[in-house]
Amino acid sequence: MDSNGVVARRRRPGLTVLRIFLVILLCLAVVAATIGVLWQQGMLSLAGRCMSSSTVTVVASPAVEPALNQAVAKWNATRPTVDGACLTARTVVQESGQAAAAVGPGWDPARDGGKPDVWVPDSSVWLSVAGSRPEAAALLTAEGTSIASSPAVLALRKPMAGALGWPQKQLGRQDVIGALSQPDVWAKAGHPEYANARVGLTDPATSTAGLASVLSILDPTGTGELGEQQLIAGLQVSRVVGGFAPDASVFFAAQTTAAAVDPNSVVAAFPALEKEVAEFNAANPGGEMAPVYDPQQTFVADFPFVPLTADWVSERDRAAVAEIREYLTGAEARAILARHYLRTPDGAVADAAVLPSEGGYPATPPAARAAITPERLSQVMAAWADLQRKVNLLVVLDTSGSMTKPVPGTQLNRLALLQQTAGTGFNLLPHTMSIGLWEFSGRGGEPHRELVPFGPYPAMAGAVPRAQALTQSVGQLRAEGDTPLYDTVYDAFKTMQKQWEAGSTNSVVIITDGANEVATGLTLAQLTEKLGKEQIKEKPVQVVTIAVGPDADAESLEQVASAAGGRNLVLREPGSAIETLVLAFTGRLQ
Protein backbone atom coordinates (compact mmCIF):
# COMPACT_ATOMS: atom_id res chain seq x y z
CA MET A 1 0.00 0.00 0.00
CA ASP A 2 1.35 3.42 -0.86
CA SER A 3 1.18 6.58 1.22
CA ASN A 4 -2.28 7.33 -0.15
CA GLY A 5 -3.62 3.98 0.95
CA VAL A 6 -3.79 2.44 -2.60
CA VAL A 7 -2.65 -1.15 -2.92
CA ALA A 8 -0.03 -1.43 -5.67
CA ARG A 9 -0.41 -4.39 -8.15
CA ARG A 10 2.73 -6.35 -8.75
CA ARG A 11 3.53 -7.37 -12.36
CA ARG A 12 3.78 -11.07 -12.90
CA PRO A 13 6.96 -11.95 -14.79
CA GLY A 14 5.30 -14.88 -16.64
CA LEU A 15 2.65 -12.68 -18.29
CA THR A 16 5.24 -10.23 -19.62
CA VAL A 17 7.29 -13.04 -21.11
CA LEU A 18 4.16 -14.48 -22.74
CA ARG A 19 3.36 -11.17 -24.40
CA ILE A 20 6.87 -10.84 -25.74
CA PHE A 21 6.67 -14.39 -27.08
CA LEU A 22 3.39 -13.68 -28.86
CA VAL A 23 4.81 -10.56 -30.47
CA ILE A 24 7.78 -12.55 -31.71
CA LEU A 25 5.48 -15.20 -33.18
CA LEU A 26 3.45 -12.52 -34.92
CA CYS A 27 6.59 -11.00 -36.45
CA LEU A 28 7.76 -14.39 -37.61
CA ALA A 29 4.38 -15.03 -39.24
CA VAL A 30 4.58 -11.70 -41.11
CA VAL A 31 8.13 -12.51 -42.25
CA ALA A 32 7.05 -15.97 -43.38
CA ALA A 33 4.12 -14.55 -45.32
CA THR A 34 6.38 -11.99 -46.94
CA ILE A 35 8.87 -14.67 -47.90
CA GLY A 36 6.04 -16.71 -49.40
CA VAL A 37 4.89 -13.78 -51.51
CA LEU A 38 8.44 -13.06 -52.61
CA TRP A 39 8.90 -16.72 -53.37
CA GLN A 40 5.85 -16.79 -55.61
CA GLN A 41 6.98 -13.62 -57.34
CA GLY A 42 10.45 -15.05 -57.94
CA MET A 43 12.22 -12.61 -55.58
CA LEU A 44 13.89 -15.38 -53.56
CA SER A 45 15.41 -18.68 -54.56
CA LEU A 46 15.74 -21.88 -52.58
CA ALA A 47 19.10 -20.86 -51.21
CA GLY A 48 17.92 -17.33 -50.54
CA ARG A 49 20.29 -15.98 -53.18
CA CYS A 50 17.72 -13.93 -55.18
CA MET A 51 17.55 -10.35 -54.05
CA SER A 52 16.24 -9.13 -57.43
CA SER A 53 13.98 -10.39 -60.20
CA SER A 54 13.40 -10.16 -63.94
CA THR A 55 9.93 -10.45 -65.46
CA VAL A 56 9.70 -11.11 -69.19
CA THR A 57 6.61 -9.97 -71.11
CA VAL A 58 5.51 -12.18 -74.01
CA VAL A 59 2.96 -10.66 -76.40
CA ALA A 60 1.13 -13.54 -78.09
CA SER A 61 -1.76 -13.94 -80.51
CA PRO A 62 -5.14 -15.17 -79.22
CA ALA A 63 -4.67 -18.45 -81.09
CA VAL A 64 -1.62 -19.45 -79.05
CA GLU A 65 -1.83 -17.35 -75.87
CA PRO A 66 -3.93 -19.77 -73.75
CA ALA A 67 -1.53 -22.63 -74.45
CA LEU A 68 1.48 -20.37 -74.06
CA ASN A 69 0.17 -19.00 -70.77
CA GLN A 70 -0.19 -22.51 -69.40
CA ALA A 71 3.32 -23.45 -70.53
CA VAL A 72 4.78 -20.26 -69.05
CA ALA A 73 3.08 -20.98 -65.72
CA LYS A 74 4.77 -24.38 -65.69
CA TRP A 75 8.10 -22.72 -66.38
CA ASN A 76 7.56 -20.16 -63.63
CA ALA A 77 6.86 -23.01 -61.21
CA THR A 78 10.40 -24.32 -61.72
CA ARG A 79 11.64 -21.07 -60.08
CA PRO A 80 14.32 -20.36 -62.67
CA THR A 81 17.23 -18.05 -61.84
CA VAL A 82 20.07 -16.38 -63.67
CA ASP A 83 23.04 -14.62 -62.05
CA GLY A 84 21.27 -14.53 -58.69
CA ALA A 85 18.06 -13.05 -60.10
CA CYS A 86 14.78 -14.94 -60.05
CA LEU A 87 13.04 -15.14 -63.43
CA THR A 88 9.37 -15.05 -64.25
CA ALA A 89 7.35 -14.57 -67.43
CA ARG A 90 3.88 -13.31 -68.21
CA THR A 91 1.84 -13.46 -71.39
CA VAL A 92 -0.21 -10.64 -72.86
CA VAL A 93 -2.73 -11.37 -75.61
CA GLN A 94 -2.88 -9.17 -78.71
CA GLU A 95 -4.01 -9.81 -82.29
CA SER A 96 -1.06 -10.30 -84.61
CA GLY A 97 -2.15 -7.53 -86.96
CA GLN A 98 -2.47 -5.07 -84.10
CA ALA A 99 0.90 -6.02 -82.69
CA ALA A 100 2.47 -5.70 -86.15
CA ALA A 101 1.22 -2.13 -86.32
CA ALA A 102 2.36 -1.30 -82.78
CA VAL A 103 5.78 -2.91 -82.50
CA GLY A 104 8.61 -0.40 -82.60
CA PRO A 105 10.45 2.11 -80.41
CA GLY A 106 7.22 4.06 -80.02
CA TRP A 107 5.32 1.20 -78.36
CA ASP A 108 2.70 2.87 -76.18
CA PRO A 109 2.15 0.98 -72.89
CA ALA A 110 -1.05 2.92 -72.20
CA ARG A 111 -2.52 1.88 -75.54
CA ASP A 112 -0.79 -1.41 -76.30
CA GLY A 113 0.05 -2.78 -72.84
CA GLY A 114 3.44 -3.38 -71.24
CA LYS A 115 6.47 -3.22 -73.52
CA PRO A 116 7.17 -6.72 -74.84
CA ASP A 117 10.43 -8.61 -74.62
CA VAL A 118 9.14 -11.32 -76.96
CA TRP A 119 6.54 -11.40 -79.71
CA VAL A 120 4.74 -14.60 -80.74
CA PRO A 121 2.44 -13.78 -83.70
CA ASP A 122 0.40 -16.43 -85.49
CA SER A 123 2.70 -16.42 -88.48
CA SER A 124 6.08 -15.19 -89.67
CA VAL A 125 4.22 -13.28 -92.36
CA TRP A 126 3.37 -10.69 -89.69
CA LEU A 127 7.09 -10.15 -89.27
CA SER A 128 7.10 -9.11 -92.93
CA VAL A 129 4.14 -6.82 -92.32
CA ALA A 130 5.83 -5.16 -89.35
CA GLY A 131 9.24 -5.23 -91.00
CA SER A 132 8.00 -3.05 -93.84
CA ARG A 133 8.35 -0.20 -91.32
CA PRO A 134 12.05 0.61 -90.73
CA GLU A 135 11.49 1.49 -87.07
CA ALA A 136 9.90 -1.92 -86.49
CA ALA A 137 12.48 -3.79 -88.56
CA ALA A 138 15.19 -2.55 -86.19
CA LEU A 139 13.52 -4.48 -83.34
CA LEU A 140 13.07 -7.68 -85.37
CA THR A 141 16.67 -8.57 -86.13
CA ALA A 142 16.73 -11.72 -83.96
CA GLU A 143 15.82 -15.00 -85.61
CA GLY A 144 12.45 -16.42 -84.63
CA THR A 145 11.91 -19.98 -83.45
CA SER A 146 8.68 -21.78 -84.35
CA ILE A 147 7.06 -23.30 -81.26
CA ALA A 148 3.98 -24.82 -82.98
CA SER A 149 2.06 -24.75 -86.25
CA SER A 150 -1.48 -24.78 -87.62
CA PRO A 151 -2.47 -24.82 -91.32
CA ALA A 152 -4.92 -22.23 -92.63
CA VAL A 153 -8.10 -23.85 -93.91
CA LEU A 154 -11.53 -23.00 -95.21
CA ALA A 155 -14.05 -24.00 -92.55
CA LEU A 156 -17.12 -25.48 -94.27
CA ARG A 157 -20.30 -26.79 -92.69
CA LYS A 158 -19.89 -30.54 -92.43
CA PRO A 159 -23.18 -31.51 -94.15
CA MET A 160 -22.30 -29.30 -97.12
CA ALA A 161 -18.83 -30.83 -97.30
CA GLY A 162 -20.47 -34.26 -97.31
CA ALA A 163 -22.74 -33.23 -100.18
CA LEU A 164 -19.59 -32.44 -102.18
CA GLY A 165 -18.09 -35.87 -101.48
CA TRP A 166 -15.97 -35.13 -98.41
CA PRO A 167 -14.16 -36.85 -96.70
CA GLN A 168 -13.79 -39.55 -99.37
CA LYS A 169 -13.05 -36.77 -101.88
CA GLN A 170 -10.35 -34.26 -101.05
CA LEU A 171 -11.84 -30.79 -101.43
CA GLY A 172 -9.94 -27.63 -102.27
CA ARG A 173 -10.83 -23.98 -101.83
CA GLN A 174 -11.86 -23.63 -105.46
CA ASP A 175 -14.23 -26.61 -105.17
CA VAL A 176 -16.09 -24.83 -102.39
CA ILE A 177 -16.11 -21.38 -104.01
CA GLY A 178 -17.25 -22.90 -107.30
CA ALA A 179 -20.12 -24.72 -105.61
CA LEU A 180 -21.24 -21.62 -103.71
CA SER A 181 -21.27 -19.59 -106.94
CA GLN A 182 -23.40 -22.17 -108.80
CA PRO A 183 -26.67 -22.93 -107.00
CA ASP A 184 -27.48 -25.78 -109.40
CA VAL A 185 -24.57 -27.75 -107.90
CA TRP A 186 -26.52 -28.18 -104.68
CA ALA A 187 -29.73 -29.11 -106.48
CA LYS A 188 -27.87 -31.85 -108.36
CA ALA A 189 -26.41 -33.04 -105.06
CA GLY A 190 -29.92 -33.32 -103.60
CA HIS A 191 -29.59 -30.29 -101.34
CA PRO A 192 -31.28 -27.28 -102.97
CA GLU A 193 -31.55 -25.70 -99.50
CA TYR A 194 -27.84 -24.86 -99.69
CA ALA A 195 -28.27 -22.62 -102.74
CA ASN A 196 -28.28 -19.39 -100.72
CA ALA A 197 -25.20 -20.21 -98.64
CA ARG A 198 -22.34 -17.71 -98.83
CA VAL A 199 -18.68 -17.38 -97.92
CA GLY A 200 -17.42 -15.08 -95.19
CA LEU A 201 -14.24 -13.03 -95.36
CA THR A 202 -12.10 -11.97 -92.43
CA ASP A 203 -10.00 -8.81 -92.45
CA PRO A 204 -6.55 -9.63 -93.88
CA ALA A 205 -5.12 -6.58 -92.10
CA THR A 206 -5.82 -8.15 -88.70
CA SER A 207 -6.73 -11.82 -89.23
CA THR A 208 -4.07 -14.41 -90.02
CA ALA A 209 -6.62 -16.71 -91.64
CA GLY A 210 -7.94 -13.75 -93.67
CA LEU A 211 -4.43 -12.90 -94.82
CA ALA A 212 -3.83 -16.55 -95.71
CA SER A 213 -7.04 -16.58 -97.73
CA VAL A 214 -6.01 -13.53 -99.76
CA LEU A 215 -2.62 -15.08 -100.52
CA SER A 216 -4.28 -18.36 -101.52
CA ILE A 217 -6.59 -16.54 -103.93
CA LEU A 218 -4.20 -14.04 -105.52
CA ASP A 219 -0.93 -15.98 -105.20
CA PRO A 220 -2.03 -19.63 -104.97
CA THR A 221 1.29 -21.23 -105.93
CA GLY A 222 3.47 -18.85 -103.94
CA THR A 223 5.42 -17.88 -107.05
CA GLY A 224 4.79 -14.16 -106.69
CA GLU A 225 2.94 -13.91 -110.00
CA LEU A 226 -0.17 -11.74 -109.81
CA GLY A 227 -1.87 -12.14 -113.17
CA GLU A 228 -5.31 -11.80 -114.68
CA GLN A 229 -6.30 -15.36 -113.73
CA GLN A 230 -5.70 -14.51 -110.08
CA LEU A 231 -7.74 -11.32 -110.36
CA ILE A 232 -10.63 -13.27 -111.87
CA ALA A 233 -10.35 -15.80 -109.03
CA GLY A 234 -10.60 -12.88 -106.62
CA LEU A 235 -13.77 -11.69 -108.36
CA GLN A 236 -15.27 -15.17 -108.11
CA VAL A 237 -14.79 -15.08 -104.35
CA SER A 238 -16.09 -11.53 -104.02
CA ARG A 239 -19.26 -12.51 -105.84
CA VAL A 240 -20.26 -15.10 -103.23
CA VAL A 241 -19.34 -13.10 -100.14
CA GLY A 242 -22.11 -13.02 -97.57
CA GLY A 243 -20.39 -11.22 -94.72
CA PHE A 244 -17.23 -9.57 -93.43
CA ALA A 245 -15.77 -9.86 -89.94
CA PRO A 246 -12.57 -8.91 -88.10
CA ASP A 247 -11.80 -12.57 -87.40
CA ALA A 248 -13.26 -16.06 -87.63
CA SER A 249 -14.82 -15.98 -84.16
CA VAL A 250 -17.75 -13.96 -85.53
CA PHE A 251 -18.55 -16.62 -88.12
CA PHE A 252 -18.03 -19.51 -85.70
CA ALA A 253 -20.56 -17.86 -83.38
CA ALA A 254 -23.00 -17.47 -86.28
CA GLN A 255 -22.99 -21.25 -86.81
CA THR A 256 -24.72 -21.64 -83.45
CA THR A 257 -27.07 -18.65 -83.73
CA ALA A 258 -30.51 -18.51 -85.37
CA ALA A 259 -30.70 -16.71 -88.72
CA ALA A 260 -33.24 -14.27 -87.34
CA VAL A 261 -30.70 -13.15 -84.76
CA ASP A 262 -27.38 -13.19 -86.62
CA PRO A 263 -27.16 -11.97 -90.23
CA ASN A 264 -23.91 -13.90 -90.61
CA SER A 265 -25.78 -17.20 -90.33
CA VAL A 266 -25.92 -17.25 -94.16
CA VAL A 267 -22.13 -17.73 -94.08
CA ALA A 268 -21.40 -21.44 -94.48
CA ALA A 269 -17.67 -21.26 -95.26
CA PHE A 270 -14.94 -18.93 -94.06
CA PRO A 271 -11.15 -18.85 -93.54
CA ALA A 272 -9.84 -20.09 -90.19
CA LEU A 273 -6.88 -21.84 -88.66
CA GLU A 274 -7.10 -25.60 -88.30
CA LYS A 275 -6.82 -25.31 -84.51
CA GLU A 276 -9.82 -22.97 -84.44
CA VAL A 277 -11.91 -25.52 -86.37
CA ALA A 278 -10.84 -28.36 -84.08
CA GLU A 279 -11.54 -26.26 -80.99
CA PHE A 280 -15.00 -25.32 -82.27
CA ASN A 281 -15.84 -28.91 -83.21
CA ALA A 282 -14.87 -30.17 -79.76
CA ALA A 283 -17.25 -27.68 -78.17
CA ASN A 284 -20.09 -28.22 -80.67
CA PRO A 285 -20.69 -31.92 -81.32
CA GLY A 286 -23.31 -32.34 -84.01
CA GLY A 287 -22.60 -28.92 -85.51
CA GLU A 288 -19.04 -29.44 -86.70
CA MET A 289 -17.21 -27.69 -89.50
CA ALA A 290 -15.05 -29.57 -92.03
CA PRO A 291 -11.50 -28.27 -92.56
CA VAL A 292 -10.77 -27.73 -96.27
CA TYR A 293 -7.06 -27.51 -97.10
CA ASP A 294 -5.38 -25.94 -100.12
CA PRO A 295 -4.13 -28.89 -102.20
CA GLN A 296 -1.03 -27.12 -103.55
CA GLN A 297 0.68 -24.64 -101.27
CA THR A 298 -0.81 -24.37 -97.79
CA PHE A 299 -0.36 -21.27 -95.68
CA VAL A 300 0.82 -22.49 -92.29
CA ALA A 301 0.76 -20.41 -89.11
CA ASP A 302 4.16 -21.17 -87.58
CA PHE A 303 3.93 -19.18 -84.31
CA PRO A 304 7.48 -17.81 -84.24
CA PHE A 305 8.99 -16.97 -80.85
CA VAL A 306 10.79 -13.69 -81.67
CA PRO A 307 12.98 -11.90 -79.09
CA LEU A 308 12.86 -8.15 -79.61
CA THR A 309 16.13 -6.25 -79.91
CA ALA A 310 14.75 -3.22 -78.12
CA ASP A 311 16.60 -0.86 -75.79
CA TRP A 312 14.19 -1.70 -72.96
CA VAL A 313 15.28 -5.38 -73.03
CA SER A 314 18.18 -5.77 -70.57
CA GLU A 315 20.92 -8.38 -70.67
CA ARG A 316 19.18 -10.21 -67.84
CA ASP A 317 15.89 -10.12 -69.77
CA ARG A 318 17.64 -11.59 -72.80
CA ALA A 319 19.01 -14.39 -70.66
CA ALA A 320 15.51 -15.05 -69.35
CA VAL A 321 14.12 -15.05 -72.90
CA ALA A 322 16.70 -17.65 -73.91
CA GLU A 323 15.65 -19.83 -70.96
CA ILE A 324 11.96 -19.58 -71.91
CA ARG A 325 12.66 -20.38 -75.56
CA GLU A 326 14.57 -23.51 -74.57
CA TYR A 327 11.69 -24.63 -72.36
CA LEU A 328 9.05 -24.02 -75.06
CA THR A 329 10.89 -26.26 -77.51
CA GLY A 330 11.03 -29.10 -74.98
CA ALA A 331 8.77 -32.10 -74.53
CA GLU A 332 6.68 -30.73 -71.64
CA ALA A 333 5.75 -27.52 -73.44
CA ARG A 334 5.10 -29.37 -76.72
CA ALA A 335 2.59 -31.60 -74.93
CA ILE A 336 0.78 -28.55 -73.56
CA LEU A 337 0.64 -26.91 -77.00
CA ALA A 338 -0.61 -30.15 -78.57
CA ARG A 339 -3.53 -30.33 -76.13
CA HIS A 340 -4.58 -26.91 -77.45
CA TYR A 341 -5.06 -28.33 -80.99
CA LEU A 342 -1.66 -27.23 -82.30
CA ARG A 343 0.76 -29.23 -84.42
CA THR A 344 4.50 -29.46 -83.93
CA PRO A 345 6.63 -26.92 -85.82
CA ASP A 346 7.25 -29.45 -88.60
CA GLY A 347 3.50 -29.99 -89.10
CA ALA A 348 3.12 -33.34 -87.40
CA VAL A 349 0.09 -34.18 -85.26
CA ALA A 350 1.48 -34.57 -81.75
CA ASP A 351 -1.82 -35.59 -80.15
CA ALA A 352 -4.14 -37.64 -82.37
CA ALA A 353 -6.86 -37.44 -79.74
CA VAL A 354 -7.40 -33.72 -80.42
CA LEU A 355 -6.62 -33.77 -84.18
CA PRO A 356 -7.98 -37.18 -85.26
CA SER A 357 -7.63 -38.26 -88.88
CA GLU A 358 -11.29 -39.35 -88.92
CA GLY A 359 -12.19 -35.73 -88.21
CA GLY A 360 -10.58 -34.67 -91.48
CA TYR A 361 -7.22 -33.60 -90.03
CA PRO A 362 -4.46 -35.21 -92.12
CA ALA A 363 -1.48 -36.59 -90.23
CA THR A 364 0.71 -34.78 -92.74
CA PRO A 365 -0.77 -31.58 -94.23
CA PRO A 366 0.03 -30.36 -97.76
CA ALA A 367 3.38 -28.68 -98.30
CA ALA A 368 3.71 -25.25 -96.70
CA ARG A 369 4.07 -22.28 -99.02
CA ALA A 370 7.32 -20.36 -99.09
CA ALA A 371 7.81 -17.13 -97.17
CA ILE A 372 6.71 -13.92 -98.85
CA THR A 373 8.75 -10.73 -99.01
CA PRO A 374 7.34 -7.49 -97.58
CA GLU A 375 7.34 -5.96 -101.08
CA ARG A 376 5.42 -8.85 -102.59
CA LEU A 377 2.97 -8.90 -99.70
CA SER A 378 2.31 -5.19 -100.19
CA GLN A 379 1.51 -5.77 -103.87
CA VAL A 380 -0.92 -8.58 -103.12
CA MET A 381 -2.69 -6.57 -100.43
CA ALA A 382 -2.99 -3.55 -102.72
CA ALA A 383 -4.54 -5.72 -105.45
CA TRP A 384 -6.97 -7.22 -102.96
CA ALA A 385 -8.01 -3.79 -101.70
CA ASP A 386 -8.66 -2.73 -105.28
CA LEU A 387 -10.83 -5.79 -105.89
CA GLN A 388 -12.94 -4.96 -102.85
CA ARG A 389 -13.51 -1.33 -103.84
CA LYS A 390 -17.00 -0.48 -105.05
CA VAL A 391 -17.19 0.27 -108.78
CA ASN A 392 -19.62 2.44 -110.73
CA LEU A 393 -19.18 1.44 -114.36
CA LEU A 394 -20.66 2.41 -117.71
CA VAL A 395 -19.69 -0.11 -120.39
CA VAL A 396 -19.86 1.23 -123.97
CA LEU A 397 -19.53 -1.27 -126.84
CA ASP A 398 -18.70 -0.57 -130.47
CA THR A 399 -21.31 -2.28 -132.69
CA SER A 400 -20.28 -0.71 -136.00
CA GLY A 401 -19.98 -2.78 -139.17
CA SER A 402 -16.29 -3.56 -138.69
CA MET A 403 -17.18 -5.70 -135.67
CA THR A 404 -18.21 -8.47 -138.08
CA LYS A 405 -14.58 -9.11 -139.02
CA PRO A 406 -13.19 -12.48 -137.87
CA VAL A 407 -10.85 -12.87 -134.92
CA PRO A 408 -7.71 -14.78 -136.00
CA GLY A 409 -7.21 -18.07 -134.19
CA THR A 410 -10.90 -18.40 -133.30
CA GLN A 411 -14.18 -19.18 -135.00
CA LEU A 412 -15.66 -15.90 -133.76
CA ASN A 413 -16.00 -12.44 -135.20
CA ARG A 414 -15.15 -9.43 -133.07
CA LEU A 415 -18.70 -8.84 -131.88
CA ALA A 416 -19.19 -12.50 -130.94
CA LEU A 417 -15.96 -12.38 -128.95
CA LEU A 418 -17.19 -9.33 -127.05
CA GLN A 419 -20.54 -10.99 -126.42
CA GLN A 420 -18.82 -14.06 -125.01
CA THR A 421 -16.42 -12.19 -122.76
CA ALA A 422 -19.14 -9.75 -121.65
CA GLY A 423 -21.32 -12.65 -120.55
CA THR A 424 -18.47 -14.09 -118.49
CA GLY A 425 -17.59 -10.73 -117.02
CA PHE A 426 -21.15 -9.84 -116.08
CA ASN A 427 -21.41 -13.16 -114.23
CA LEU A 428 -18.51 -12.07 -112.04
CA LEU A 429 -19.99 -8.77 -110.92
CA PRO A 430 -20.29 -8.37 -107.14
CA HIS A 431 -23.58 -7.29 -105.64
CA THR A 432 -22.00 -4.04 -104.45
CA MET A 433 -21.51 -2.81 -108.01
CA SER A 434 -23.54 -0.37 -110.12
CA ILE A 435 -23.44 -0.68 -113.90
CA GLY A 436 -24.99 0.48 -117.15
CA LEU A 437 -24.57 -0.68 -120.76
CA TRP A 438 -24.51 1.28 -124.04
CA GLU A 439 -23.78 0.42 -127.65
CA PHE A 440 -22.59 2.87 -130.31
CA SER A 441 -22.75 2.93 -134.10
CA GLY A 442 -24.06 5.39 -136.66
CA ARG A 443 -27.29 3.61 -137.50
CA GLY A 444 -30.66 5.23 -136.75
CA GLY A 445 -29.31 8.77 -136.65
CA GLU A 446 -28.09 8.54 -133.04
CA PRO A 447 -24.44 8.00 -132.08
CA HIS A 448 -25.27 5.66 -129.18
CA ARG A 449 -28.14 3.81 -127.53
CA GLU A 450 -28.76 2.84 -123.92
CA LEU A 451 -29.27 -0.91 -123.60
CA VAL A 452 -29.41 -1.23 -119.79
CA PRO A 453 -29.90 1.87 -117.62
CA PHE A 454 -27.26 2.60 -114.99
CA GLY A 455 -28.12 1.31 -111.53
CA PRO A 456 -27.21 -1.15 -108.74
CA TYR A 457 -26.40 -4.60 -110.06
CA PRO A 458 -28.81 -6.44 -107.72
CA ALA A 459 -31.70 -4.09 -108.57
CA MET A 460 -34.28 -4.37 -111.32
CA ALA A 461 -33.72 -2.85 -114.75
CA GLY A 462 -37.26 -2.23 -115.85
CA ALA A 463 -39.23 -5.46 -115.56
CA VAL A 464 -36.24 -7.82 -115.18
CA PRO A 465 -33.23 -8.09 -112.86
CA ARG A 466 -30.28 -6.05 -114.09
CA ALA A 467 -28.11 -9.18 -114.37
CA GLN A 468 -30.65 -10.71 -116.75
CA ALA A 469 -31.01 -7.46 -118.70
CA LEU A 470 -27.24 -7.26 -119.24
CA THR A 471 -27.03 -10.83 -120.52
CA GLN A 472 -30.03 -10.50 -122.80
CA SER A 473 -28.93 -7.16 -124.24
CA VAL A 474 -25.44 -8.37 -125.06
CA GLY A 475 -26.83 -11.49 -126.69
CA GLN A 476 -29.04 -9.42 -129.02
CA LEU A 477 -26.34 -7.06 -130.33
CA ARG A 478 -25.85 -6.72 -134.11
CA ALA A 479 -23.10 -4.96 -135.97
CA GLU A 480 -23.71 -2.34 -138.66
CA GLY A 481 -23.03 1.33 -139.37
CA ASP A 482 -20.06 3.60 -138.79
CA THR A 483 -18.18 4.61 -135.61
CA PRO A 484 -19.21 7.87 -133.89
CA LEU A 485 -16.48 7.42 -131.29
CA TYR A 486 -15.74 10.93 -130.00
CA ASP A 487 -19.34 12.08 -129.41
CA THR A 488 -20.07 8.79 -127.61
CA VAL A 489 -17.06 9.12 -125.30
CA TYR A 490 -18.06 12.64 -124.31
CA ASP A 491 -21.71 11.75 -123.65
CA ALA A 492 -20.70 8.71 -121.58
CA PHE A 493 -18.25 10.83 -119.57
CA LYS A 494 -20.92 13.42 -118.77
CA THR A 495 -23.43 10.71 -117.85
CA MET A 496 -21.05 9.16 -115.32
CA GLN A 497 -20.31 12.55 -113.80
CA LYS A 498 -23.99 12.65 -112.84
CA GLN A 499 -23.74 9.13 -111.37
CA TRP A 500 -20.54 9.82 -109.43
CA GLU A 501 -20.41 8.28 -105.95
CA ALA A 502 -17.91 8.86 -103.17
CA GLY A 503 -15.82 5.90 -102.05
CA SER A 504 -16.16 4.22 -105.45
CA THR A 505 -14.17 3.93 -108.64
CA ASN A 506 -16.26 5.81 -111.21
CA SER A 507 -15.36 4.77 -114.75
CA VAL A 508 -16.37 4.57 -118.39
CA VAL A 509 -15.02 1.64 -120.41
CA ILE A 510 -15.02 2.14 -124.19
CA ILE A 511 -14.34 -0.97 -126.28
CA THR A 512 -13.84 -0.34 -130.00
CA ASP A 513 -12.12 -1.92 -132.98
CA GLY A 514 -11.88 1.18 -135.14
CA ALA A 515 -11.52 4.94 -135.34
CA ASN A 516 -13.90 7.89 -135.32
CA GLU A 517 -15.65 7.75 -138.71
CA VAL A 518 -18.09 10.67 -138.66
CA ALA A 519 -17.34 14.03 -140.19
CA THR A 520 -19.67 15.94 -137.92
CA GLY A 521 -19.53 16.21 -134.15
CA LEU A 522 -16.50 16.56 -131.95
CA THR A 523 -12.94 16.34 -133.23
CA LEU A 524 -10.18 14.64 -131.27
CA ALA A 525 -8.75 17.98 -130.17
CA GLN A 526 -12.15 19.24 -129.05
CA LEU A 527 -12.88 16.03 -127.13
CA THR A 528 -9.59 15.94 -125.25
CA GLU A 529 -9.91 19.63 -124.40
CA LYS A 530 -13.43 19.12 -123.01
CA LEU A 531 -12.41 16.06 -121.01
CA GLY A 532 -9.54 17.95 -119.44
CA LYS A 533 -11.44 21.15 -118.67
CA GLU A 534 -14.68 19.52 -117.51
CA GLN A 535 -13.11 16.91 -115.25
CA ILE A 536 -14.10 17.69 -111.64
CA LYS A 537 -11.05 17.22 -109.47
CA GLU A 538 -13.05 16.29 -106.38
CA LYS A 539 -15.27 13.90 -108.41
CA PRO A 540 -13.04 12.27 -111.02
CA VAL A 541 -14.42 10.00 -113.73
CA GLN A 542 -11.89 7.79 -115.50
CA VAL A 543 -12.20 6.86 -119.16
CA VAL A 544 -10.63 3.51 -120.00
CA THR A 545 -10.31 2.78 -123.70
CA ILE A 546 -9.64 -0.66 -125.19
CA ALA A 547 -8.41 -0.87 -128.77
CA VAL A 548 -9.44 -4.26 -130.16
CA GLY A 549 -7.82 -5.66 -133.29
CA PRO A 550 -5.31 -4.27 -135.83
CA ASP A 551 -7.62 -1.54 -137.17
CA ALA A 552 -8.23 0.29 -133.90
CA ASP A 553 -6.89 3.85 -133.68
CA ALA A 554 -4.73 3.19 -130.61
CA GLU A 555 -2.94 6.53 -130.78
CA SER A 556 -6.13 8.59 -130.65
CA LEU A 557 -7.60 6.36 -127.96
CA GLU A 558 -4.46 6.89 -125.88
CA GLN A 559 -4.98 10.65 -126.03
CA VAL A 560 -8.64 10.31 -125.07
CA ALA A 561 -7.92 8.11 -122.08
CA SER A 562 -5.04 10.28 -120.92
CA ALA A 563 -7.19 13.44 -121.06
CA ALA A 564 -9.67 11.85 -118.61
CA GLY A 565 -7.08 10.38 -116.25
CA GLY A 566 -7.61 6.84 -117.53
CA ARG A 567 -5.61 4.40 -119.60
CA ASN A 568 -5.68 2.73 -123.00
CA LEU A 569 -5.16 -0.98 -123.63
CA VAL A 570 -4.23 -2.26 -127.07
CA LEU A 571 -5.40 -5.79 -127.90
CA ARG A 572 -4.07 -6.42 -131.39
CA GLU A 573 -4.85 -10.11 -131.02
CA PRO A 574 -8.10 -10.13 -129.03
CA GLY A 575 -8.43 -13.91 -129.28
CA SER A 576 -5.55 -14.28 -126.84
CA ALA A 577 -6.78 -11.55 -124.51
CA ILE A 578 -9.96 -13.15 -123.20
CA GLU A 579 -9.11 -12.58 -119.55
CA THR A 580 -8.28 -8.90 -120.16
CA LEU A 581 -11.67 -8.38 -121.80
CA VAL A 582 -13.44 -10.21 -118.96
CA LEU A 583 -11.78 -7.89 -116.44
CA ALA A 584 -12.76 -4.91 -118.58
CA PHE A 585 -16.41 -5.86 -118.25
CA THR A 586 -16.03 -5.94 -114.48
CA GLY A 587 -14.17 -2.63 -114.25
CA ARG A 588 -11.17 -4.34 -112.58
CA LEU A 589 -8.33 -3.78 -115.01
CA GLN A 590 -5.06 -3.25 -113.16
Image (spheres, rainbow, N blue to C red):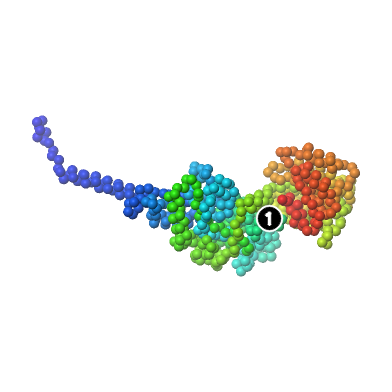
Which residue occupies 51% across, 66% down? 352
Residue located at (79% from left, 54% from top): 571
Residue picked out by circle 1: 226
Q: Residue at x 73, y 55 (%)?
A: 427
Which residue reaches farthest top?
A: 4
The amino acid sitting under disc 1 is Leu
The answer to whether residue 426 is left or right of residue 301 is right
- In the image, taking residue 5 as reference, residue 500 lies left or right, namely right
What x and y, as percent, mark residue 558? 80, 46
Q: Position of residue 106 (x, y in %)?
A: 53, 43
Mark 1 falls on what kind of element? loop
Residue 245 rendering spot, x and y as whole percentages = 59, 51
The quadrant of the picture occupied by the N terminus is top left
Q: Residue at x 39, y 56 (%)?
A: 78
The one nearer the camera, 429 or 145, is 145
The answer to whether residue 255 is seen in the rendering is no
Is 486 or 241 nearer to us in this picture? 486
Number of numbered tags placed on the structure image: 1
Q: Residues within 10 Å of mark 1 (few under 14, many from 20)?
A: some
Specify whether 3 is left or right of 314: left
| Residue found farthest to the bottom | 168
